[in-house]
Image: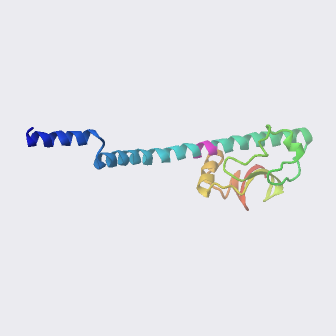
Amino acid sequence: MNPLLRSRTRRRRRRAQGFTLIEIMIVVVIIGFLASMAIPAFQKVRRNTQNNTFVNDLRQMRAAAEECNMEHGEYPPDGFPGNFPAALEAYLPTGIGSHRTPVGGMWDWDYDQFGVKAGISVYEPTADAGQMQEVDRLVDDGNLGSGNFRARPSGYIYVIEF
């Protein structure tokens, strides 16, 4: 057999056995590039879902507190984080006040606290101030220092009545 032909046959055989390191590296770089584009998009969707769920829960709790106030003529007394007063608990959707909030931390009913007559708080949320400002834009004026959704010691409060 011709030595030149034998050399070509060996190269073909070697090539047919697997991928070269360069080919594998190119595939890894492409996958890494696609992941670097997809992961931030997934994180943004997750954060938006948390914010919208949190706002929806706030609105349901506000409606429950206002209904309790209309039927009893007053808001229930102050509660503790994760433990709403029984009078208010009866108006809340099942389990909404006892679980952790979508932004971390515990729900808290505040009556005559933090300079407001009635409000729903999130105590010690794990979300950063930027995310809470996004929530404020959904509910209020985007300023955590004023309006109906604002910062309070160790958390944030959604004011029902001043």
Residue 125 falls in image quadrant: bottom right
Colouring method of the image:
rainbow
Q: Which residue in the rendered view is the most extreme toward the left?
A: 2
- In the image, is 85 to the left or to the right of 56? right
Is 89 inside the magenta-drawn segment? no
Give the residue drawn at x 73%, y 48%: 100
Name the residue located 82 percent from the left edge and 43 percent from the top edge.
65
So how many labels did they put on this image?
0
Give the magenta part as a residue range.
Answer: 47-51
- Furthest residue in direction bottom, as rendered: 153
21 or 72: which is nearer to us? 21
Task: From the top left corner, tell me how far across and down residue 96 is, in percent.
Answer: 77, 42
Q: Quadrant of residue 138?
A: top right
Q: Nearer the viewer, residue 70 or 16?
A: 16
Give the image location of residue 117, x and y in percent. 82, 53
Residue 122's x, y, as percent?
73, 52
Q: Quadrant of the N terminus?
A: top left
> Residue placed at 78% from the left, 45% from the top?
97
| Residue furthest front as drawn | 1
Secondary structure mainly formed by the magenta segment: helix
- Residue 131 coordinates in the image, percent (x, y): 60, 52
Q: Residue at x 75, y 52 (%)?
A: 106
Of residues 118 and 93, the one drawn nearer to the viewer in this rendering: 93
Left or right of 3? Residue 40 is right
Q: Is residue 77 left or right of residue 26?
A: right
In the figure, is residue 91 to the left or right of 40?
right
